[in-house]
Amino acid sequence: MYRILDKDTIKMEIIPHLSEAKRGFKTKSCLEENVNGILYKLKTGCQWHLLSVGSLFSEVVLSYKTVFEHFRKWCKDGSWKQAWISLLKANKLHLDLSSASIDGSHTPAIRGGGAVAYQGRKKEKND
């Protein structure tokens, strides 16, 4: 079984912040394995349908769709964000942001972008 974090860390640090179903569908596998599957997807960047669920779950193997639905539900209600913020606060001293590349917002816009009223639908000219 492939693990991103051990079950104790997931149970102590992440699970308390995630919402649980009050009625209706109850998951067949433990939440630690669902969270591990989500973390695996986020770490590797693979597509949801290529998630190797056979190596992520020990007893009951869930579909990638079920793992995605848990992730989607937790994102919608804000509990995944709350878990992320609490993990960042707890490990703030161990983070090294000296070489972090978070997104492409520092990339220069072609021909000045919004300053020259560049419209993305028009084909760019290569002068």
Image (cartoon, helix red, strand yellow):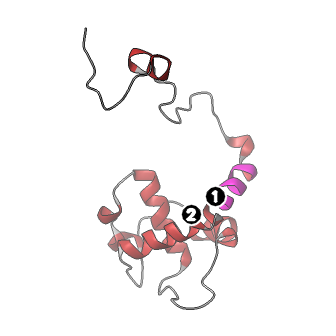
As shown in the figure, which amino acid type bears the numbered disc 2? Cys
Query: Vertically, is 48 above or below 45?
Result: below
- Residue placed furthest toward the top: 127
| 71 vs 39, nearest the viewer | 71
Task: Tell me if residue 3 can be seen.
Answer: no
Q: Which residue is mark 1?
A: 81
**Element at badge 1?**
helix
CA separation in Å, label 1 and label 2: 7 Å
- Quadrant in the picture for the N terminus: bottom left
Q: Which residue is mark 2?
A: 75
Total label count? 2
Q: Which residue is pictured at 35% across the width and 54% down the height?
A: 46
Q: Which residue is pictured at 65% across the width and 66% down the height?
A: 79
Magenta-colored stretch includes residue 104: no
Can you give x and y, in whole percent of width and height, for residue 76 in the image?
A: 57, 65
Q: Which residue is pictured at 38% across the width and 19% down the height?
A: 110
- Residue placed furthest toward the front: 117
As shown in the figure, which amino acid type bears the numbered disc 1? Lys
Task: Tell me if residue 74 can be seen.
Answer: yes
Query: Vertically, is 89 above or below 104?
Result: below
Does residue 8 appear to the left or right of 103 in the view shown? right
| 99 vs 23, nearest the viewer | 23
Query: Vertically, is 63 above or below 122?
Result: below
**Element at badge 2?**
helix
Magenta part of the chain: 81-89
Can you give x and y, in whole percent of width and height, for residue 60 in the image?
A: 40, 84
Dominant SS in magenta: helix
